[in-house]
């Protein structure tokens, strides 16, 4: 096998010490030779003997010529290296982007100097600041593979601000800022971008980040189109969700049939006893003993029906099953992944922030995930008609003995007339809505010993909060 | 009342048996109660004019009881009562020869009409 050129060899095969020495010697020569030549010329001027002065002068000229030659040689090597680097960039069989993130570097430095270190909290609370910063990130170049992968006519379709390709529904940009601020050596994210033809592509971006934010300029980002993969993943999730839903529907159906039977039997006995009692009383000579027995039967059967209802409520409402100590931040991340596409379709831009080391709560993860999904979809639907950015912000923090989740939207809010009833079963203000979601959410949260409530300002959105007690086992 | 028609009630639910008994007696029928299909078949003296039976019961169910009684008393009118009034069950009961099929809870007039048709009129 032919030996690979130096730039193509794996890092482990580089020989850094000889290379360093080689460059160091060249640099010393490049700097020292003109100095020595200058010294010789000065010495020639000071020496009285013409032959020695001429020798010094010739030597100085030779040294100057050597310096000029070395400079020319180094310059040629540099140009060749740049040319080779550009060729690698241009011909690579993977999508490469050269992006100028200096504005982000400066902003992060400025924020840190201003005492702001929690970038996630800062930009989650002020998503418009992140949008403004995003407009200052410039795509300087993309390679031929990118143009081909994205079905563009030429690279001009990509050059310019990052805003051109990153839609408002993106929620990964803030994560990149945080990675910059934290000094991460590299970062990767799955974002969705707008292709030149207007279609949306799911894309995996990976980049090595600068170690020092002060003075860096461009970063090279690799990109991979994962649209098909994400679509397959979404189909899989949808299929799994459908199976789970079908299973639950079947369970609910079986449960409903059992409850119907358990309730219908005493009801039937009540009706029959009551009718019998009336008939005994309506006889020409009322049979009071039989009537009394029938009425006694009514009371006994009604008590039995009440017990069935109480047992059912106890079974369904007050005993969450499959409880485990769960991390609500993880549950929220999973819930976001689950409905990412639906939220994107609704134009919602999700911002997520969780305190570090949020204590675990004792809960059924599936039920809590359903609550989160429900609140997020509700929030996104509340903003569906907005022209302004549809920010959906989820924050998780400890609140004394509880962990509290806030789901904030920027919709029209909830009118005061509707507010007292929004958690009622079958109450809805949305056309086509069933009016079950919030009722089920509240029932579920309360069954876990928690609380679900809402704060809203008409015209300024709503914040749904729920809190769950911290798990005693952690 | 010595000429009253005899109605056999087969239901595993004691409350239903007691309530039906009271109602049918108030209508003038003589009633015999059985907690299971097996106990009804085992009672050699059980020779009712009409059988009222539940479907879902432990052991032999109402449909099986219908088939078992058809050999012994092919003309015995059978009224089926159930808390699971699915169409398939109804069809099976009617196919097995049931005269009427009632869903629990039912009104007194409904069963009175069925019995009247089965045994020729309430007293």
Image (cartoon, coloured by chain):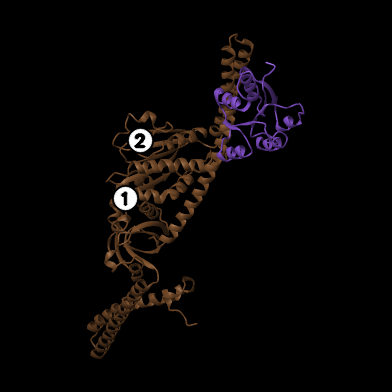
Chain colours: A brown, B purple
* Mark identifier at residue A130: 1
When the figure is inspected, residue A242 is found, relative to residue A19, above or below; the finding is above
Give neighbour class at mark 2: few <14, some 14-19, many 20+ (Cα, 10 Å).
few
**Residue at x 25%, y 91% (from the top left corner):** A51
Residue A122 visible from this viewpoint:
yes
User: For the residues carrying marks 1 and 2, which lies nearer the camera in this image?
Assistant: 2
Q: Is residue B60 left or right of residue A301?
A: right
- Residue A89 lies, in percent from the top left, at 36, 71
- In the rendered structure, the residue with mark 1 lies on which chain? A
* Mark identifier at residue B109: none
Q: A377 or A167: which is nearer to us?
A: A377
Q: A426 or A282: which is nearer to us?
A: A282
Are labels 1 and 2 on one chain? yes
Q: Is residue A253 left or right of residue A192?
A: right
Q: Quadrant of the C terminus of chain A?
A: top right
Q: A474 or A306: which is nearer to us?
A: A306
Numbered-mark total? 2
**Residue at x 69%, y 24% (from the top left corner):** B33
Q: Is residue A92 left or right of residue A297?
A: left
- Residue B49 lies, in percent from the top left, at 68, 26
Give neighbour class at mark 1: few <14, some 14-19, many 20+ (Cα, 10 Å).
some
Q: A346 or B38: which is nearer to us?
A: B38
When the figure is inspected, residue A466 is found, relative to residue A354, above or below; the finding is above
When the figure is inspected, residue A90 is found, relative to residue A287, above or below; the finding is below
Q: Secondary structure at mark 2?
A: loop
Find disc 2 in the rendering and name its residue.
A429
Residue A394 visible from this viewpoint:
no
**Residue at x 52%, y 46% (from the top left corner):** A246
- Residue A378 lies, in percent from the top left, at 38, 41
Q: Quadrant of residue B27?
A: top right
**Residue at x 40%, y 69% (from the top left corner):** A94
């Amino acid at each position: 096998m032919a030996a690979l050129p130096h730039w193509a060899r794996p890092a482990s095969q580089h020989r850094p010490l000889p290379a360093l020495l080689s460059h160091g010697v060249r640099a010393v020569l490049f700097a020292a030779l003109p100095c020595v030549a200058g010294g010789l010329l000065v010495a020639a001027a000071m020496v009285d003997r013409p032959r020695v002065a001429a020798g010094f002068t010739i030597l100085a000229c030779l040294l100057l010529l050597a310096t000029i030659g070395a400079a020319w040689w180094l310059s040629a090597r540099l140009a060749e290296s740049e040319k080779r680097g550009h060729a690698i960039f241009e011909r690579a069989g993977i999508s490469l982007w050269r992006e100028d993130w200096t504005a982000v570097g400066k902003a992060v430095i400025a924020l840190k100097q201003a005492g702001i270190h929690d970038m996630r909290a800062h930009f989650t609370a002020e998503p418009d600041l992140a949008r403004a910063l995003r407009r200052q990130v410039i795509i300087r170049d993309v390679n031929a593979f990118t143009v081909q992968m994205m079905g563009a006519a030429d690279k001009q379709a990509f050059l310019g601000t990052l805003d051109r390709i990153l839609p408002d529904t993106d929620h990964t940009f803030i994560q990149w800022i945080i990675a910059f601020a934290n000094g991460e050596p590299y970062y990767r994210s799955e974002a969705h971008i707008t292709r030149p033809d207007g279609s949306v592509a799911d894309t995996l971006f990976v980049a090595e980040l600068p170690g020092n934010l002060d003075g860096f300029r461009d970063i090279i980002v690799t990109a991979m189109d994962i649209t098909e993969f994400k679509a397959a993943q979404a189909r899989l999730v949808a299929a799994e969700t459908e199976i789970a839903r079908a299973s639950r529907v079947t369970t609910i159906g079986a449960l409903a049939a059992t409850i119907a039977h358990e309730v219908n039997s005493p009801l039937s006995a009540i009706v029959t006893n009551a009718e019998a009692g009336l008939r005994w009383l309506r006889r020409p000579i009322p049979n009071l003993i039989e009537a009394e027995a029938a009425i006694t039967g009514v009371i006994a059967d009604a008590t039995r029906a009440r017990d069935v209802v109480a047992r059912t409520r106890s079974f369904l409402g007050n005993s969450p099953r499959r409880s485990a100590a769960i991390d609500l931040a993880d549950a929220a991340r999973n819930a976001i992944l689950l409905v990412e596409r639906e939220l994107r379709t609704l134009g919602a831009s999700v911002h997520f922030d969780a305190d570090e080391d949020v204590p675990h709560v004792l809960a059924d993860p599936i039920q809590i995930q359903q609550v989160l999904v429900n609140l997020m979809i509700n929030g996104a639907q509340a903003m569906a008609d907005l022209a302004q950015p549809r920010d959906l912000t989820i924050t998780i923090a400890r609140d004394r003995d509880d962990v509290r989740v806030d789901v904030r939207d920027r919709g029209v809010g909830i009118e005061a007339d509707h507010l007292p009833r929004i958690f009622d079963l079958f109450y809805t203000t949305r056309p086509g809505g069933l009016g079950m979601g919030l009722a089920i959410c509240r029932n579920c949260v309360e069954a876990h010993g928690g609380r679900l409530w809402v704060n809203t300002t008409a015209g300024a959105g709503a914040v749904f909060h729920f809190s769950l007690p911290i798990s005693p086992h952690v | 009342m010595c000429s009253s028609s005899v109605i056999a009630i087969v239901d595993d639910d004691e409350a239903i048996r007691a309530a039906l008994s009271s109602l049918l007696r108030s209508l003038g029928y003589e009633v015999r109660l059985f907690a299971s299909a097996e106990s009804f078949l085992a009672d050699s003296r059980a020779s009712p004019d009409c059988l009222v039976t539940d479907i879902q019961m432990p052991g032999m169910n109402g449909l099986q009881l219908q088939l078992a009684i058809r050999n012994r008393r092919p003309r015995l009118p059978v009224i089926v009562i159930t808390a699971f009034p699915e169409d398939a069950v109804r069809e099976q009961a009617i196919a097995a020869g049931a005269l009427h099929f009632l869903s629990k809870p039912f009104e007194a007039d409904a069963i009175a009409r069925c019995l009247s048709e089965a045994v020729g009129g309430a007293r």
